[in-house]
Amino acid sequence: MRSLQTAFPENFLWGGAIAANQAEGAYDADGKGISITDCFPHGIKHDADLPPVEGKFYPSHEAIDFYHNYKEDLALMQQMGFNVFRTSINWTRIFPNGDDAEPNEKGLQFYDNLFDEMLSRGMQPLVTLSHYETPLHLVEAYGSWRNRKLIDIFLRYCEVVFRRYKNKVKYWLTFNEINNMRRMPGAAGGIFFKEGENQQQVVYQACHHMFIANSLAIKLCHEIIPDAKIGCMLSLSNTYPHTCKPEDVFETMELRRRSLLFGDVMIRGEYPAYMAHIWEEENVRLETEPGDEELLKKYTADYLGFSYYRTSTHEYGQPFCGDTDGDQGTPNPYLETTPWGWQIDPLGLRYTLNELYDRWQIPLFVVENGLGQVDVPDENGQIHDSYRIDYLRRHLLAVKEAIRDGVEVMGYTYWGPIDIVSAGTGEMKKRYGFVYVDRDNDGNGTMERRKKDSFDYYSHVIATNGADL
Ligand code: BGP
């Protein structure tokens, strides 16, 4: 029986999270190939140009040039006291086409330098292997994850980076928000549909290949880096029934299961019983190979990393549609809304932490939570983002209460500790950061970095291990 925990644990991991494609820029530098996210001119909620159009503006191509500014940026993160920093390795820096005979040494060297910088500043790297960064060539030559060959191609990439960084990186995540295969399969897995395809068949078959790849990556990680922890990662902002009408309640459960099923497979190690009915309804006939079931069962996630931003509500009969961070339904009249339609619900985070821990009883890591807002500098160029401090305080209080509820929480990496490119819309205007970056949606600006008021607040939170929120 675990004793009552009333505070953040002493070894709690405090930090921030970005993704290579939303921060690094240098999209074609030092041998890097084109990844899927280099093809979206207006973010992953909108159409991609396959391949990118010469001379057209794509936000990820320069982003905030973290590739050349990472030392300055990590120095700012160190000032806040981070002991963990989440980012992704951009797959196409290591294997520009995905199936290259040899890895790209300049790409490997960049991440050696990046992880060394993090470690020298007291931060553990938390590395996502694939954060929407599937190599474009794998889409064109193989159809991406619909092709079972992607498993071996992905594992080769994993083996190279596990061996290269085994003494530097102890926290890994496989596929960022893998359950977004349902909402945005282009970004989440390089799946672009062909005319007349049974789209659900394509998506679930691609997910099966990713589930097998996830298990084999876990196996490989434990063999190469025995003291590492490797988790799966889901987008789990929550959805409430819009009313107490039984139809609203039941269909909301079915909607939530469309995301939870990914955790059921990668944490419990098997497809849940309710999948048979879903596949029957959607005319899906999964093709598996001998040994697949045993692999899923034997190699499951060490922890669950998940993103939580907001909640929405679902009414019976509404379509199951979503945003970068979760399902998008009917507005909740009890919650305030951001300019991007995201409803702010700190208690929802406590609710979700309890929901997930009740379901899977494995350590949880909040690897994305943050407030995207329009930040307007005052006459002195300062940003008084009291709204972001309020969001952060209320969500950290929710995490603290969930810990008191008995939930095992490993850490918290705030999404976008420095302004970066929005995944969903490609905007800089949707700012999350404690550090402002002088750059607008069209790529204009000095790239200068400037602390916001929230910078000092988060610094204090970390310095007091969340005792004084
Ligand atoms: C999640 C992604 C992140 C991040 C976040 C915020 O889906 O894992 O990449 O972008 O959403 O979404 P957005 O950038 O669209 O505001």
Image (spheres, rainbow, N blue to C red):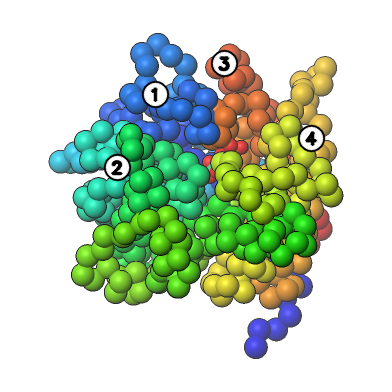
Instruction: Give whichever of discs 2 and 1 has the lower sequence position.
Output: 1
Instruction: Give whichever of discs 2 and 4 has the lower sequence position.
Output: 2
Q: Taking 454 as reference, is 153 above or below it?
A: below
Q: Taking 407 as reference, is 197 above or below it?
A: above
Distance between mark 2 and mark 3 Cα atoms: 30 Å
Quarter of the rendered image showing ligand 1: top right
- Residue type indicated by callout 1: Asp
Q: Position of residue 124 (x, y in %)?
A: 50, 54
Distance between mark 1 and mark 3 Cα atoms: 18 Å
- Name, please, the residue furthest toward the bottom: 1
> Which residue position is annotated with label 2?
144
Quadrant housing residue 362: bottom right
Quadrant location of the C terminus in the rendered image: bottom right
Instruction: Check disc 3 and report its element: helix, strand or loop.
Output: loop
Distance between mark 4 and mark 3 Cα atoms: 23 Å
Instruction: Give whichever of discs 2 and 3 has the lower sequence position.
Output: 2
| Mark sitting on residue 385 | 4
Disc 2 and disc 1 in contact, CB within 8 angstroms: no
The label nearer to you, 1 versus 3, is 1
Instruction: Check disc 1 and report its element: helix, strand or loop.
Output: loop
Residue found at x 48% / y 23%: 41
> Which residue position is annotated with label 1?
49
Between 177 and 262, the one nearer to me in the picture: 262
- Residue type indicated by callout 3: Asp
Q: Position of residue 405 (x, y in %)?
A: 73, 74
Instruction: Check disc 4 and report its element: helix, strand or loop.
Output: loop
